[in-house]
């Protein structure tokens, strides 16, 4: 039966025991063959660990590792261009709507001299604008426009999902 723990045997090997405990351990080792065998095994492990040379790294090792990690987390140029193009489309669409409203206001032959005329002109311009949209988005026009928008949303969702999946894979590798 083993009476000494590995912790005590390791302290014995390292010379970390006080005199009283050292004498007790020596006495147990002289009486117990299994403890003596464990001591010999631990001594061989200790000697092997001391013989291992430290691996030296270059001075800029941390910088190199961090730059590689940050390079993996940067979005690809194709992803950037796609996101920019989709965003640009919606910005240009908004600007076109604003431009049409302004053009309708400017083209009006009425000269507003009071706030009632300005308000009436603005309401009539909005009615003209809504009737224009009504013509564009009636019947097959709405289904074509809806199909284009739906396709754009699906493509955008696919690229965002794919980008998210790649980021998770990179994080799992780290």
Image (tube, rainbow, N blue to C red):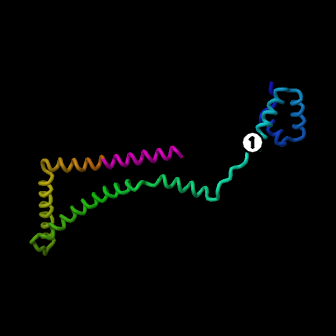
In percent of the image, x 48 and y 52: which residue is there? 72
Residue 49, located in which quarter of the rendered image? top right
Check residue 160 for magenta coloring: yes
Q: Is residue 126 magenta?
A: no
Q: How many marks?
A: 1
**Residue nearest the viewer, comparing 68 with 171:** 68
Query: What are the residue bounds of the magenta stretch?
Result: 155-174
Mark 1 crowd level (few <14, some 14–19, many ≥20, 10 Å Cα)? few
Which SS class for mark 1? helix
Residue drawn at (78%, 33%), measured in percent from left and top? 41
Instruction: Please state the horizontal and vertical placement of residue 25, each as a whole percent of the image.
Output: 86, 34
Residue at position x 49%, y 55% in the image: 71
Residue 113, image x, y percentages: 13, 75
- Up the image or down, 102 lies above or below 142; here it is below
Residue ID at (76%, 44%) = 51
Residue extending furthest left? 109
x, y percentage for residue 12? Answer: 83, 38
- 30 displayed left or right of 81: right
Image spot of residue 28 (x, y percent):
87, 30
Q: Which residue is mark 1?
A: 49
- Quarter in which the N terminus is drawn: top right
């Amino acid at each position: 039966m083993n009476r000494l723990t590995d912790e005590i045997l390791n302290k014995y090997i390292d010379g970390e025991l006080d005199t009283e405990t050292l004498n007790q351990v020596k006495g147990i080792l002289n009486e117990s063959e299994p403890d003596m065998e464990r001591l010999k095994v631990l001594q061989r492990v200790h000697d092997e660990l001391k013989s291992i040379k430290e691996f030296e790294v270059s001075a800029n090792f941390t910088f190199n590792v961090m730059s590689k990690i940050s390079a993996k987390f940067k979005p690809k140029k194709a992803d950037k261009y796609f996101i920019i193009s989709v965003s640009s489309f919606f910005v240009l669409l908004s600007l076109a709507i604003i431009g049409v409203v302004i053009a309708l206001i400017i083209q009006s032959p009425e000269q507003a001299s009071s706030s009632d005329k300005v308000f009436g002109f603005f309401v009539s311009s909005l009615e003209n604008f809504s009737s224009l949209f009504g013509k564009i988005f009636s019947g097959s026009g709405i289904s074509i426009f809806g199909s284009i928008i739906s396709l754009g949303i699906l493509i955008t969702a696919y690229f965002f999902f794919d980008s998210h999946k790649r980021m998770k894979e990179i994080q799992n590798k780290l």
